[in-house]
Amino acid sequence: MEFAGRDIISIRDFSREEIDHILKIASAMEPLAHKGSEMLKGKILATLFFEPSTRTRLSFEAAMHKLGGSTIGFAGAEIASVRKGENLADTVRTVENYADVIAIRHPLEGAARLAAEFAKVPIINGGSGAEEHPTQALLDLYTILKEKATIDGLKIALMGDLRYGRTVHSLAYALSNYNVELYLVSPESLKMRREVLEEIKGKIPVIEETNIARVIPNLDVLYVTRIQQERFPDPAEYMKVKGSYKITLELLKNAREDMIILHPLPRVDEITPEVDNTPHARYFQQVWNGIVVRMALLALILGAVK
Ligand code: NCD
């Protein structure tokens, strides 16, 4: 298992053994996330975010700072030279002179892969269009493991926009390495991308469903996502599904007492705020877990831990 110098583009580039190792290192990072470390002193992370972000960019930056490193970068394509017509390959070949590792978020699928082809330093995909978001999947797995002490044996539902949501694509691929039963719950028009479904169906049992009420009593983990309004080619299609599902206290009456609810955030209206005060809600703990998982990834990729 070698992580030093590696790109993180797709979760499919990692074996179960490698994923388990990342989760183990993340757990070892918990105390350092509280007290800080000089592990990456002198190292620089560049964050190139061509799309909106709160958690992914800030947690990468916080993770780097907690390990003693520093960060540079931009958020919003309008302030970078892309506005002047610079292409991604040239941007990356410039930024690699300033940084030891680059985290990139881009609206186009394949953008992170392209950047990795040109860059001499490791590239981390912080979200590539509707395609993938591998570091989110790792922190989702870490949260499940921390909360449930196991991933194997669980019944897990991914709910919401399974078509345009990149987090659920990466998470579905990631979970297919484990012995789980996977429920895919979405409105008909937002069903899981066929290419993802085809791949995971051969590895784990998958049940597609449109009504969450029918499956909620079975679940150990309910992973909710927002409808990705910005990715709809046609606003009329969005209007048809807007507000079409919602996790409420009423619905949760039929859930197992120890079922946990995760969400990559941001939330729009798919989980009512009253749910936040129930023992099911774990989405803000999940945010913390993003820090330790990203600390682990930076330390591994930069060769500070094995
Ligand atoms: C997600 C994203 O950007 O894909 N957010 C995140 O990184 N936590 C989810 C979303 O935007 O719905």
Image: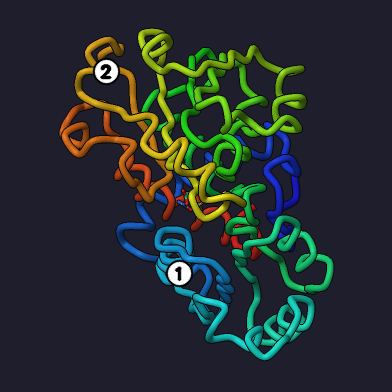
Q: Is residue 113 left or right of residue 236?
A: right
Q: Distance between the residues labelled 1 and 2?
A: 37 Å
Q: What residue type is labelled 1?
A: Glu
Pointer 1: what residue?
A: 61
Q: Is residue 127 positioned above or below 105 on the image?
A: above
Q: Which amino acid does label 2 sit on?
A: Leu
Can you tell which of label 1 and label 2 is closer to the viewer? 2
Q: Which of 220 and 167 is in front in this view?
A: 167
**Residue 119, percent across and down?**
78, 73
Instruction: Please name the residue shown 67% across and 48% down the image.
Output: 131
**Residue 40, percent across and down?**
53, 71
Pointer 2: what residue?
A: 251
Q: Is residue 259 left or right of residue 233?
A: left
- The secondary element bearing badge 1 is classed as helix
- Earlier-in-chain disc, 1 versus 2: 1
The disc at residue 125 is none
Tally the numbered discs.
2
Badge 1 crowding class, 10 Å Cα cut-off, few under 14, some 14 to 19, many 20 or more, is: many
Q: Nearer the viewer, residue 35 or 147?
A: 147
Quadrant of res 202: top right
Badge 2 crowding class, 10 Å Cα cut-off, few under 14, some 14 to 19, many 20 or more, is: few
Q: Does the residue labelled 1 lie within 8 Å of ligand 1?
A: no
Instruction: Please name the residue shown 76% across and 32% down the image.
Output: 195
Q: In this view, does 243 lie to the left or right of 134?
A: left
- State yes or no: discs 1 and 2 in contact (Cβ < 8 Å): no
Q: Can residue 241 be seen in this view?
A: yes
**Residue 26, percent across and down?**
49, 46
Instruction: Please name the residue shown 41% across and 14% down the image.
Output: 219
Residue that protrudes farthest toward the front in the picture: 236
**Residue 2, percent across and down?**
75, 50
